[in-house]
Image (cartoon, rainbow, N blue to C red):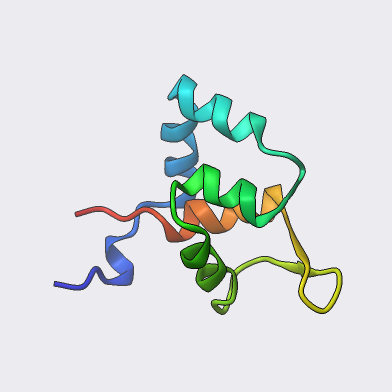
Amino acid sequence: MQPGRDDFVPVDEIKKIICSDSDMKERIDALPYNLLVSDIVKFLGLCESTVYKITRSPGFPRVNIGVTKFLVPRPLFLDWYFSNCFYQK
């Protein structure tokens, strides 16, 4: 069964839950202000090729700084992460 839009937990609630976890809060605070693919790989625990696929998806917050290079601002990444990576079962 695919989760519907009504199944999602509000972003503010997710932020509150995650920030109450001290390990996750430390991981978030340790992120640089502008993330590279390697930072996202480490944070999400996914392989590099999967992260590149994610960064090319519509709605992913990336800032192109060249033909093949890009940065991801931490606040925009965290908004994307909180909005897209959690849902109620």
Toward which corner of the image does residue 72 lie, by quadrant? bottom right
Say which residue appears at 76% left-offset and 66% top-offset. 70
What percent of the width, then of the height, locates residue 60?
60, 69
Toward which corner of the image does residue 18 lie, by quadrant? top left
Closest to the observer, 56 or 67: 67
Say which residue appears at 54% left-offset and 51% top-offset. 41
Left or right of 66 in this view: 32: left
Closest to the observer, 81 or 88: 81
Closest to the observer, 50 or 58: 50
Q: Is residue 25 visible?
A: yes
Q: Is residue 18 above or below residue 62?
A: above
What percent of the width, then of the height, locates residue 36?
70, 53
- Tag count: 0
Q: Is residue 78 visible?
A: no
| Quadrant for the N terminus in the image | bottom left
Say which residue appears at 44% left-offset and 53% top-offset. 46
Identify the residue at the far top of this view.
22
Left or right of 44 in this view: 7: left
Closest to the observer, 81 or 7: 81
What percent of the width, then of the height, locates residue 85?
41, 56
What percent of the width, then of the height, locates residue 87?
31, 55
| Quadrant for the C terminus in the image | bottom left
Left or right of 19 in this view: 32: right
Left or right of 69 in this view: 51: left
Identify the residue at the far left of this view.
1
